[in-house]
Amino acid sequence: MSSKTQLKLAPTVKLNNGYEMPVLGLGTYESKNNEGEKAVKHAIDIGYRHIDTAYFYQNEAEIGKAIRDKIAEGVVKREDIFLVTKLWNIHHEADRVEGACRKQLALFGLDYIDLYLMHLPVGYKFVSEEVLLPKDEKDVLQLSDVDYLDTYKAMEKLVKLGLVRSIGVSNFNSEQIQRILDNCEIKPVTNQVECSPALNQKPLTAFCKERGITLTAYSPLGRPAPAEQKPEFIYSPKTQAIAKKYGKTAPQIVLRYLVELGVIPIPKSSNVSRITENFDIFDFELSAEDRAVLDSFHTGVRLVPFNLIKPQNHKYYPFAIEY
Ligand SMILES: NC(=O)c1ccc[n+]([C@@H]2O[C@H](COP(=O)([O-])OP(=O)(O)OC[C@H]3O[C@@H](n4cnc5c(N)ncnc54)[C@H](OP(=O)(O)O)[C@@H]3O)[C@@H](O)[C@H]2O)c1
């Protein structure tokens, strides 16, 4: 048997438009200066097919290169990869959307994106392509009042143009999703939000599921930057004991728990052994008892509350209601 046929891929979920999305992806925030290229190449080699990027991460060129190189090597075909990227908040005006998307495609060096997400329902003032966080002289982030529905309608055109296969949203609350559904022609396929054992998003996941929308889980490991963040759900002796029982690591237990909740985690790593570790979660199942232990870590506290926007009481700030 060749190494290719031995490769185990992640299961996929069928989206509301018929496309399949792998239930585990690679996050790439802060994977740049060649780290992103190396991470994505290794990830593809070991079986990841879902890669999450964004205009904001400024790594689309190196990630595109990694994907193109793996296609050229014959490791994958373009249709094997599920590439996600996001429309940044400075590009919310309807007449900027197509240009932003085309610019991202040019950076990738690819001719379509699998899934294009609106990064946030709140737009930022456009100053230039390079100013991603426009601030005034008092260091206050400059927001815009563009209606995310107008932005979404411009994203629908990208599907019709064949530039993107699916569209979706990120950091949207249930009311905002409902407003999109009540007014759209093309349904969003996912809502990408923070989701970990500490913020397990059960109500939002159920809400989305009833409407044929998946929930993608960002910061699934609670960003355990060793110096600053030591999430209890990973470091607790309770999780360590569960990990020992299954012969797995605590991050693997957490990722498995999220997959069993029916969400799609996209853990970020640019370390080859941790990229491999995070993918190795499809050969075991947690018991109901162990899942209950992980449920007990839910606090509802966000690590990513978008603090630059929060104090401004913007009408589209998504986290002012329960979910
Ligand atoms: N839509 C949005 O607004 C939004 C917001 C935030 C994130 N995201 C997306 O979601 C992805 C994941 O979220 P995140 O990056 O915030 O946080 P995360 O995936 O929860 O955590 C990433 C951190 O955990 C470390 N790590 C990864 N695997 C590990 C393991 N097995 N053991 C120990 N440490 C491990 C990584 O370091 P190493 O690299 O050194 O392994 C990195 O410091 C992002 O990269 C991005 O693609 C989207």
Image (cartoon, helix red, strand yellow):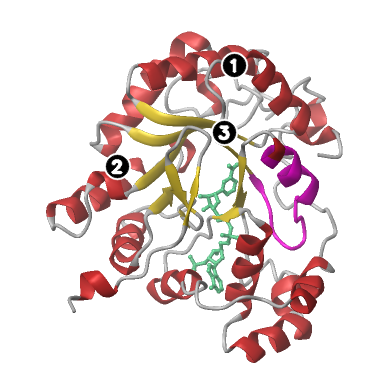
Q: Which residue is mark 3?
A: 119
Q: Which residue is mark 2?
A: 61
Q: Secondary structure at mark 1?
A: loop
Mark 3 neighbour density, 10 Å: few (under 14) some (14–19) many (20 or more): many
Q: Which residue is mark 1?
A: 184
Residue 22 vs residue 118: left or right? left
| Image height of 90 relative to 301, above or below | above
| Image height of 153 relative to 304, above or below | above
Q: Amino acid at mark 2?
A: Ala
Residue 94 vs residue 258: left or right? left
Q: Which residues are magenta?
A: 193-209
Expressed as whole percent of the image width and height from the top left, the position of residue 163 reads 33, 25
Please tell me which of labels 1 and 3 falls first in the chain. Answer: 3
Mark 1 or mark 3, which is nearer to you?
Answer: 1
Please tell me which of labels 3 and 2 falls first in the chain. Answer: 2
Q: Quadrant of residue 42?
A: bottom left
- Residue drawn at 45 percent across, 14 percent down: 96
Q: Secondary structure at mark 3?
A: loop
| Quadrant placement of the N terminus | bottom left
Mark 1 neighbour density, 10 Å: few (under 14) some (14–19) many (20 or more): some
